[in-house]
Image (cartoon, rainbow, N blue to C red):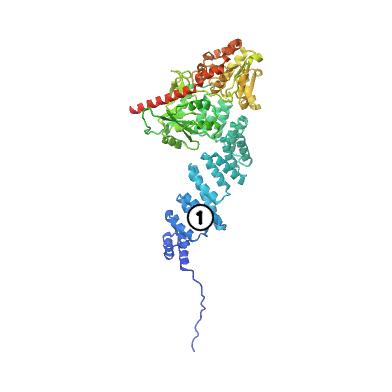
Amino acid sequence: MARTGRTQTATLTSQPPLEERILRKAAALQEAGRLRDAVQQLERVLQRNAVHAEANYKLGIIKVQAGFANDAIPHLTTALKGNPAEPRYWLSLTTALLGLGRVADARAILERFTRESFSDPLTLATKTALVGNLYQQAQGLFGERKFKEAEELVDIIVLLDENNSEAIHFAGLIAASTDRPELAYDLMSISIYQDGNAGRFFVNLSNIFSNRREFLPAIECLEKAIELGEDNFLAHNNLGLVLHKAHRFEDAIRHLETSIALNAECALAHNNLGTVYHDMGRIEQAIAAFDQALAIDPTLVCSHSNRLFSRLYANAYDPAEFIADARAFGTTFADPLLRRRPFTNDREPGRRLRVGFVSGDFFEHAVNHFFEPALRNFDKTRLELFAYSNTPGEDKATARLKTHFDVWRSIRCLDDDQTADLIEADGIDILVDMSGHTAGNRLLVFARKPAPIQVTWLGFVASTGVSAIDYRFTEGFSEPEGIGDDLYVETLWRLPRVSACYQATPTMPAVAPRAPFLENGHLTFGCFNRFTKVSDRTLQAWAEIQRRIPDARLLLEVASVDSDAIRAQVEQRLSDNGLPLDRVTLEPRLPRNRFVLNNRVDAALDPFPYNGGTTSLDTLYMGVPFIALEGDTFSSRMGHSILNNVGLPELSVPTVEAYIDLAVRMAEDRDWLLDLRDDLRGRMMRSPHMDHQLLSADLADAFEAMWRRWVAEQAD
């Protein structure tokens, strides 16, 4: 009998297509790190079907991972064309293009991708990862000041996620950093609309308002930020800064002290506290605050500049010590930056010179009362004028100044190297610093020597300490031959008449028809300079004047004196120096008081050792004579120069005793005082102070003489 054999039931299963089996094998090889073998498998698929979407995609991904992104692009493009419904293909091609820096191409792909409206979880997760990666890259580029590249990436983030408030706000920061304040405001406002609980958004928006000198909304933004939890040293520091600009000094001090309490190592907060003390006339405290900032961060250049500036106002001001400090600043910060290379400027005799002016004050600022009349009257056949503006916000004065320049450059968002490169590229022959150590200066641009000849003018009353600056404009009354040369690293270039001209403000009122004493029977002296300039020695001299003239009154204009706390501090200082408070009137520095207070005084008293400048000229133009003490530095001889140029040399005296005696004489010889007041505005208008064309010609002559000297030196 035959054996019965075993039986087996056969199960029929469908085999995956060969291409799919190869793809799976390639994926396993790729996961195992065997990329070369994986590539071979994928190429097998493409030999059978050159437009196979998944094979092209996977091959493209491997090439990107291996560092051959250029070779990957054709494969990823073919994959996308083969299956545009697959979101991975869109995002992978975008990532590869971005890796190659082909941002515009990546953006074009994503614009099409966003119209596809993919919403599956995997796509959303991939988009989120891409956004995070792009944001991190953009932050790195921003930190390197590569603003254009950062902005391109942020634009792509917003394209992928139009409700990404972080990215929109970041775009606002980039706009602010590239001098587009209106766009910055719009973007930051949108981000706040989307996320009104992000305190740091309000901190950054406040900077936009502050730069436009819109201090109330800036303050409101910072207060809101603190309310939302940004109760940190940075927010309080920024709020202190804005409150200072708004002349709310006590509030500014309170927030800056809070910033320091939260972070005692914040050098900027100590620096900013010093600037408030300076403007309040608390000079010794200001210098101490700058010293503290520098103890924390010796490289903080702004604190060195601020300290030098404040030292000019100190009771114990010593010119020899000042120049030593200025030289130390130059040696430490400026000298190492000097670029040593030959200049290629055209040396043809008699050609039109390119003159550049660098300033942080091209807005409604006192320095422009002196600069604008000269600028307006320059002979454009002799000089081609370039502006390099470091001004944070523009106003009507900015617009007016722009019309007088041949070329206007904003440098606020350029670093020092970029600015120096720009100036060199412009072929500037003579570069003029108009800020010195005051706010907004760019002295470290001058340290790089981007122009053959460099001059400092108008903005600062002492040496910058920067040896790369060749000359300083001055004149013979402030600094006659033999006086002051050893107090500068720059060579003094004495102009033949004045070194600056005065431009009256169009809104200035008429001169009072009668001296006030004719109405009230007593003499009223006044001082409308910043109280910072009023030293204790000055107050003591004024106290002696009031002692010797028992019915004399004193009218002072003091910033923020409408604050009870500030008034108390000022009155205490006056009292400590012997002034009778019942005969002193304090008025706040407000727009409504500007100029009109002059009509309430019979004569003015110039502070010392730091004299008035703009204010003294305003005073004369308003028909009020002033008494000045003649010192031995530029800052202490400004009054002497002004009075000599207006034809009143007898009002400038060499000693404090003579200063007091002159005030007493005015009280005793009131006919003489009336003679001094007679037609004083007319006298001003006829003086060199207001001969704008003459000064412009003198400056042009000086520039050409400097240029001839430089050309001759190069030939030797």
Query: Among all residues in the image, which is located at the extreme left?
Result: 716
Q: Is residue 251 above or below residue 28?
A: above
Q: Amino acid at mark 1?
A: Leu
Image quarter in which the C terminus is found: top left
Q: Is residue 701 visible?
A: yes
Q: Residue at x 63, y 23 (%)?
A: 587
Q: Position of residue 698 (x, y in %)?
A: 44, 23
Query: Among all residues in the image, which is located at the extreme bottom?
Result: 1
Q: Position of residue 311 (x, y in %)?
A: 52, 25
Q: Is residue 590 visible?
A: no
Q: Position of residue 463 (x, y in %)?
A: 47, 25
Q: Residue at x 52, y 54 (%)?
A: 112
Which residue is the site of mark 1? 91
Mark 1, residues whose alpha carbon is within 10 Å: few (<14), some, or many (≥20)?
A: many
Q: Is residue 39 above or below residue 451?
A: below
**Closer to us: 158 or 337:** 158
Q: Residue at x 41, y 60 (%)?
A: 36
Q: Quadrant of residue 454?
A: top left
Q: Which type of secondary structure does the marked residue at label 1 adopt?
A: helix
- How many numbered marks are there? 1
Q: Position of residue 697 (x, y in %)?
A: 45, 23
